[in-house]
Image (cartoon, rainbow, N blue to C red):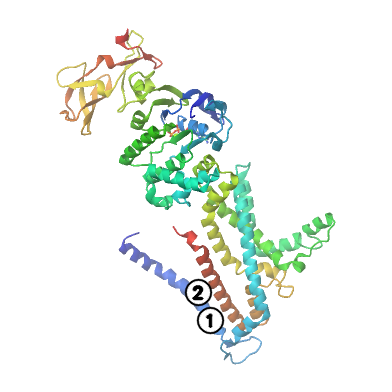
């Protein structure tokens, strides 16, 4: 695959699918962009006037925007922190030669296969419910007042639910990375007098840096657009306490039937996602090289 | 400092007995080479000495102190792995400094030790590179550098040169030998390579299926192997074995080395036809098919005139012939009787 000829051929063969994907992406994007400049509300029939950046202005100056912007960052950052730290710990545990290791590995992966809506419902009704939930039972058993998770700490509750879903993914990727670590390096470190902590910080962690980078990039893409968990549990409330950008756009365009405003929000979300992506690539992208 | 004694050491993986009870005395400053066929337990024994593998039974003593259950770092030994086992994300400098930093050596002293190791091993130009940017030979040198800065009481090498190409191997062989002479530290060296074993060793231990068949200087093993296995294992090309089940003096087979067979075109003990001829320039190996005996390897001069299909006669130097009994043990040679 290295000659000029084969590379040119490869380009031509790839062309149709690339064009198809490009169209698939570009058409909705252009339409959103177009709508975002119109005064277009489904409840108000008539001409859709061109109103310039007014939709954007409304969207961005809305106090809910700032709040949901920081909620989004908190949500992504919190879940990333929990899944990476937990994932490394879990990966190291799963790497130990324990009895029934293969079954444990499959079990650990299970939450990833549960649909977001279902897992959010399970957490909402079975675990975090202030009356019937397991946590409520547990805290009254301890003699404490049960916490009403979705009323008192709505964003944290959602972070916990989403982390639970993504932990297996991180753990699995990090586990394969740990398994690819050359055992002789650890043995050499043993001989060099490195204790468990030295070995972890000087050998294991640097070895994992690439996998951690991959996990961060992949998870960020998905976490920026968390939606189902919020819809099912808190519906963004109380107030806007657990609304992220994605959910805000939903309330704008679908609950208020404001196509123009929702489109402007969508474009803003695209821009934010790109800023985050550029920022991340600058920060940690070099880990993926070479 | 640097003597290692193995007393009735054994190792089992589950039911599989990899090292049978084994005794070995390694003297201070000695260069001892472990050779043996693949899977005979050389690496396992080396790793047991290093402390990377538990000892199932028996004792390992280092400098007269029982070290059977001492953790690897406390044994004062350094190991050079076949895969080099360098830390890929650290520079050469940090790789070498790693054991010193773990031992909390003062930074100034670390600098000075790195500098002296770099000088001995010619690492100066690439101290700030990462292992991935080095050639195999350079990596090997770094691995040795990381070992010598700790000033261990013994070095353990597990096939350190097997990933290098032939000419580099010759160079590194010399460098390691020279290092041994200048440091005068005990070295245990595992290899598959005949030439490495013969040229580097003070003593060679020949392993077979978890037991040591013979320990001795290279020449002892070459001239007086205790049994057929050692005779066949030491020397290249391999010794020729001829079965003589009809002999009446207890000998079951005889062995004669290729270099002790004379080839001529008119007279000799055995008549045969020349098969493959391998010209190496300085010498020639001929594979001669002899009726009823089989194929014998003969080593001859570089300008040997014989070619495929020639009819030749072979004769063995009588005083170099080894005789083995039914169990493969060497019998006293005829001249000694
Ligand atoms: N961790 C292990 N579990 C089970 N068996 C093992 C283990 N390590 C080694 N063995 C077995 O022990 C025997 C000796 O292995 P060892 O690595 O010591 O051989 P070796 O002499 O170094 O061979 P080579 O020259 O090919 O490196 C082999 O039969 C191997 O299969
Ligand atoms: Mg080995």
Q: Is tag 1's residue or tag 2's residue first in the polypeptide sequence?
A: 2
Where's residue B28, x and y in %? Answer: 46, 27
Where's residue B52, x and y in %? Answer: 53, 36
- SS at badge 2: helix
Query: Which chain's residue wears label 1?
Result: A
The residue carrying pointer 2 sits among few (fewer than 14), some (14 to 19) or many (20 or more) residues within 10 Å by Cα, namely: few
Q: Identify the disc placed on residue A25.
A: 2
Q: Is residue A196 left or right of residue A184?
A: right
- SS at badge 1: helix
Q: Identify the disc placed on residue A119.
A: none
Q: Is residue A159 above or below residue B57?
A: below
Q: Is residue B293 above or below residue A42?
A: above
Residue found 31% across the figure and 23% down from its top:
B239
**Viewer-side residue, A118 vs B8:** B8
Quadrant of the rendered image containing residue A173: bottom right
Can residue A118 be seen at all in this image of the molecule?
no
Residue found 42% across the figure and 25% down from its top:
B205
Q: CA distance from mark 1 to mark 2?
A: 10 Å
Can residue A49 be seen at all in this image of the molecule?
yes
What residue did someone put label 1 on?
A31
């Amino acid at each position: 695959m290295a000659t000029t000829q084969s590379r040119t051929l490869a380009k031509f063969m790839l062309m149709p699918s690339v064009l198809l994907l490009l169209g698939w992406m570009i058409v909705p994007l252009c339409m959103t962009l177009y709508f975002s400049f119109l005064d277009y509300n489904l409840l108000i029939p008539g001409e859709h006037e061109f109103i310039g950046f007014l939709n954007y202005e409304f969207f961005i100056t809305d106090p809910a925007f700032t709040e949901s912007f920081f909620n989004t960052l908190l949500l992504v950052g919190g879940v990333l922190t929990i899944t990476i730290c937990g994932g490394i710990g879990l990966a190291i545990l799963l790497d130990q030669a324990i009895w029934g290791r293969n079954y444990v590995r499959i079990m650990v992966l299970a939450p990833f296969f549960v649909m977001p809506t279902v897992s959010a419902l399970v957490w909402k009704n079975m675990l975090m419910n202030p009356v019937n939930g397991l946590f409520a039972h547990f805290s009254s058993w301890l003699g404490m007042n049960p916490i009403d998770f979705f009323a008192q700490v709505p964003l944290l509750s959602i972070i916990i639910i989403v982390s639970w879903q993504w932990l297996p993914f991180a753990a699995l990727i990090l586990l394969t990375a740990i398994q690819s670590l050359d055992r002789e390096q650890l043995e050499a470190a043993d001989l060099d007098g490195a204790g468990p902590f030295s070995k972890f910080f000087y050998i294991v962690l640097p070895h994992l840096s690439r996998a951690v980078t991959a996990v961060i990039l992949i998870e960020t893409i998905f976490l920026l657009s968390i939606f189902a968990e919020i819809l099912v549990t808190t519906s963004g409330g109380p107030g806007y306490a657990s609304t992220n950008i994605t959910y805000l756009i939903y309330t704008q365009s679908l609950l208020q039937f404001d196509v123009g405003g929702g489109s402007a929000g969508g474009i803003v979300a695209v821009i934010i996602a790109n800023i985050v992506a550029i920022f991340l690539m600058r920060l940690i992208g070099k880990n993926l090289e070479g | 400092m640097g003597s290692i004694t193995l007393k009735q050491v054994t190792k089992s993986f589950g039911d599989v007995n990899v090292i049978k009870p084994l005794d070995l005395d390694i003297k201070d400053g000695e260069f001892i080479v472990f050779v043996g066929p693949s899977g005979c337990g050389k690496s396992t024994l080396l790793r047991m000495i290093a402390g990377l593998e538990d000892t199932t039974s028996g004792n390992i003593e280092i400098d007269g102190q029982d070290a059977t259950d001492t953790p690897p770092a406390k044994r004062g030994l350094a190991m050079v792995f076949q895969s080099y086992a360098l830390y890929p994300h650290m520079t050469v400098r940090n790789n070498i400094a790693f054991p010193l930093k773990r031992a909390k050596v003062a930074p100034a002293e670390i600098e000075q030790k790195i500098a002296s190791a770099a000088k001995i091993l010619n690492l100066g130009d690439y101290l700030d590179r990462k292992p991935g940017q080095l050639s195999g030979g350079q990596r090997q040198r770094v691995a040795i550098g990381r070992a010598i800065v700790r000033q261990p009481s013994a070095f353990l090498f597990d096939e350190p040169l097997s990933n290098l190409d032939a000419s580099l191997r010759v160079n590194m062989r010399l460098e390691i030998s020279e290092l041994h002479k200048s440091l005068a530290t005990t070295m245990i060296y595992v290899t598959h390579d005949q030439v490495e074993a013969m040229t580097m060793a003070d003593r060679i231990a020949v392993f077979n299926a978890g037991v040591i068949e013979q320990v001795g200087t290279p020449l002892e093993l070459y001239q007086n192997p205790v049994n057929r296995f050692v005779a066949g294992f030491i020397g290249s090309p391999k010794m020729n074995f001829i079965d003589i089940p009809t002999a009446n003096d207890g000998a079951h087979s005889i062995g004669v080395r290729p270099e002790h067979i004379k080839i001529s075109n008119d007279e000799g003990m055995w008549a045969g036809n020349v098969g493959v001829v391998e010209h190496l320039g300085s010498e020639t190996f001929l594979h001669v098919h002899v009726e009823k005996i089989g194929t014998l390897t003969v080593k001859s001069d570089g300008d040997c005139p014989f070619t495929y299909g020639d009819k030749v006669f072979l004769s063995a130097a009588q005083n170099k012939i080894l005789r083995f009994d039914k169990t493969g043990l060497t019998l006293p040679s005829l001249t000694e009787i």
